[in-house]
């Protein structure tokens, strides 16, 4: 059941991050899920210790989803930086 929650929340977080970074037209549903899950991992490593909020693995809350969203936005900014030479 936890894996299914990861996929659903990862897809939502990846989709929201792609809307914020304006890359939604370039990504499909599968890439949104991948961006959401990798972004949640990145947010859990970098942001979660700074703000003291758990990750999605600890439980789904507004704070954990926001940490995952910020991690996904950072991931898309890094990808845009390498692909286009600018963050956007």
Image (cartoon, rainbow, N blue to C red):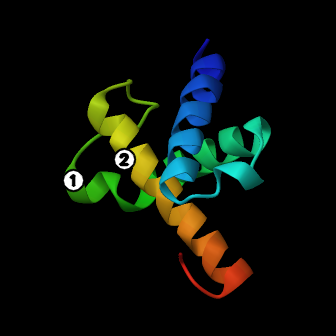
Task: Check residue 77 in the rendering and tell me which mark sits there, or answer none.
Answer: none
Viewer-closest of 38 and 32 = 32
Task: Check residue 67 in the rendering and tell me which mark sits there, or answer none.
Answer: 2
What is the x, y in percent for residue 45?
Answer: 44, 57
What is the x, y in percent for residue 8?
Answer: 60, 24
Residues at badges 2 and 1 in contact (C-beta under 8 Å)?
A: yes
Above or below for 56 versus 44: above
Q: Nearer the viewer, mark 2 or mark 1?
A: 2
From the image, tell me which residue sits under label 1. Answer: 51
* SS category of the residue bearing label 1: helix
Above or below for 34 versus 3: below
What is the x, y in percent for residue 81?
Answer: 61, 80
Viewer-closest of 69 and 1 = 69
Viewer-closest of 82 and 47 = 82
Decide: few, some or many residues near mark 2? Use Cα within 10 Å; few <14, some 14-19, many ≥20. Answer: many
Q: Quadrant of the N terminus?
A: top right
Gap between marks 2 and 1 measured at Cα: 9 Å
Q: Taking 67 as reference, is 30 left or right?
A: right
Identity of the residue drawn at 77% across and 42% down: 28
């Amino acid at each position: 059941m936890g894996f299914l929650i990861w996929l659903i929340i990862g897809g939502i977080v990846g989709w929201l991050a792609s809307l914020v970074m304006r890359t939604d037209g370039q990504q499909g549903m599968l890439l949104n899920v991948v961006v959401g899950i990798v972004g949640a991992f990145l947010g859990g490593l970098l942001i979660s210790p700074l703000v003291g909020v758990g990750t999605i693995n600890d439980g789904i809350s507004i704070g954990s989803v926001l940490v995952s969203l910020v991690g996904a936005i950072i991931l898309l900014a890094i990808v845009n930086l390498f692909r286009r030479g600018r963050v956007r």
